[in-house]
Image (cartoon, grey):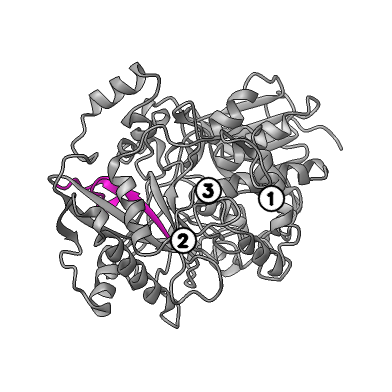
Amino acid sequence: MSPAYDFRGSRVFDYIIIGAGSAGCVLANRLSEDPSVKVLLLEAGPRDWHPFIHMPAGLSKLVNQKGVNWDYDTVAEPHLNHRTLWWPRGRVLGGSSSINAMCYIRGVAGDYDDWAAQGANGWDWNSVLPYFRKSEGNGRGADAFHGADGPLSVSDLRYTNPLSQAFIDAAQQIGLAHNPDFNGAEQQGVGFYQVTQRDGARCSSAVAYLNPARSRPNLTVHTGAQVSRITFEGLRANGVTYAMNGQGHHQPAAREVLLCGGAINSPQLLMLSGIGPADDLRKQGIEVLADVDGVGGNLQDHLDICTLFHSTRRVTYDRISDLKTAFDYYLRGRRGPGSSNIAEAGGFARSPLAPDHRADIQFHFVPAMLDDHGRRRLPGDGYTVHACFLRPRSRGRISLASNRAGDKPRIFANYLGDAEGFDLKMMVECAKLSRDILAQKAFDPYRGTPIFPDRTDLDDSGLAAFVRAKAESVYHPIGTCRMGTDAGAVVDPQLRVRGVEGLRVIDASVMPNLIGGNTNAPTIMIAERAADLIRGRAA
């Protein structure tokens, strides 16, 4: 293969990685392990310098930090009272792993066996488990399900609020089992989450994977680099164009371009580069390189309903002093409330509507009042139960609003849009189960008046109206560059984009279906396996 140079005659890069998020940082580390390979990592956002990123409890303050967030919104959702829903996504080194709640969840074996059954060959549970274990550095040690030596530190919380224990006790009082390990032999039950933290600080993919590799001479990292197009010679990807420091650049790639933008940005960039539904591209004045109708389709997300109560005791995080929290955190060696991920406790339950043995509802308990993602502060003290339906049937789409890279794409999540109305039935089940847990004896010492909903006697119709009025995203968009072997797939099981060469998508967008839980750990697993696929290595 002939060498490739940029227009300034600078160094050759074998691989260009677009996006330094959960997947991109993994690839940057694993591919640059080979000193003969030169890697360029491009990130649109800044470095992860902000102290709120690294102090776990600081995530509540990141809500309003526009500089590290793409700050997306959906279009008006027809089944949610035509509300637009906020979709925060990380725009910083580490991507969403730098702004999330750090809950370490994988899903269950059946989720990945479903992927394989749909044509994602090699992504069944037995094939992906070694990559989960490879990535994981669990403080409890290694076993058949866990790794202890991987880059991604997974630990028990150093600090928990007494209300989080009340939630666990209350859930057991309605018959849910206690489960100390949601990623072990059994997922169902309630307990404290293990978190992606190291020594009481956030362990994002940037901390876990990128930082150890930054000194390698064969790895170059550019922040503030907004990619506008993937370029091609014929049907082969040969580089990218991007803007940085007010100047435009074109950088060729000698081997492959690896797109790691996530479920929103990856399909957007493919379409801007001429890969996507042909009629839609032509409407935006984009020359069609490959007519791949699946690009942007199959959009899935976990819809979440929050049930809130006032607390009669001031033990919540609502009025905690930010200054005191930060001071105690650093003075006490990253301990105290500053080390909390806020969503400390939770779990998984199987509803009466579950079609199989898997849990279909997930809880995140927050010892504070959380309304509109924490952007609207409520007076007083309270607590919140998040509940989401894990396997929604509704499907949405990402599409272009224009042919300009700087314009946000159109996000139509189509929440509750399934023809059978099953998703709404399940969201009502989520609200009912949350209400049942909060009514238990364990909350008697804390229970004040109900906030959302403001009554505890709503029937199914009333709860359905509550869901339509208040449900929000729990930040798990996936599926818009689905992998498979059928004509509707965007990438093959090697994650290579159909219709072109030299281009792969490696992020949550390739997931065929949502897994039963949080999506960050599976995204890191996907990148670990992709690195071996690229390098031609066995598992």
Q: Secondary structure at mark 2?
A: loop
**x then y, percent, for residue 347:** 43, 55
Q: In the image, is 437 to the left or to the right of 105?
A: left
Tell me the residue at 70%/23% (across/down): 10
Q: Secondary structure at mark 1?
A: helix
State the residue in front, 60 or 5. Answer: 60
Disc 1 marks which residue?
A: 129
Residue 181's tag is 3
Q: Are marks 2 and 3 in contact (CB under 8 Å)?
A: no
Q: Quadrant of residue 163?
A: top left
Tell me the residue at 55%/35% (across/down): 205
**x then y, percent, for residue 226:** 52, 38
The mark nearer the N terminus, 1 or 2, is: 1
Label 2 crowd (10 A; few <14 / some 14-19 / many >=20): many
**Amino acid type of the residue tagged 1 in the rendering:** Leu
The mark nearer the N terminus, 1 or 3, is: 1
Q: Which residues are magenta?
A: 362-378
Disc 2 marks which residue?
A: 301
Is residue 57 visible in this depiction of the protein?
A: yes
User: How many callouts does the rendering have?
Assistant: 3
Label 3 crowd (10 A; few <14 / some 14-19 / many >=20): some
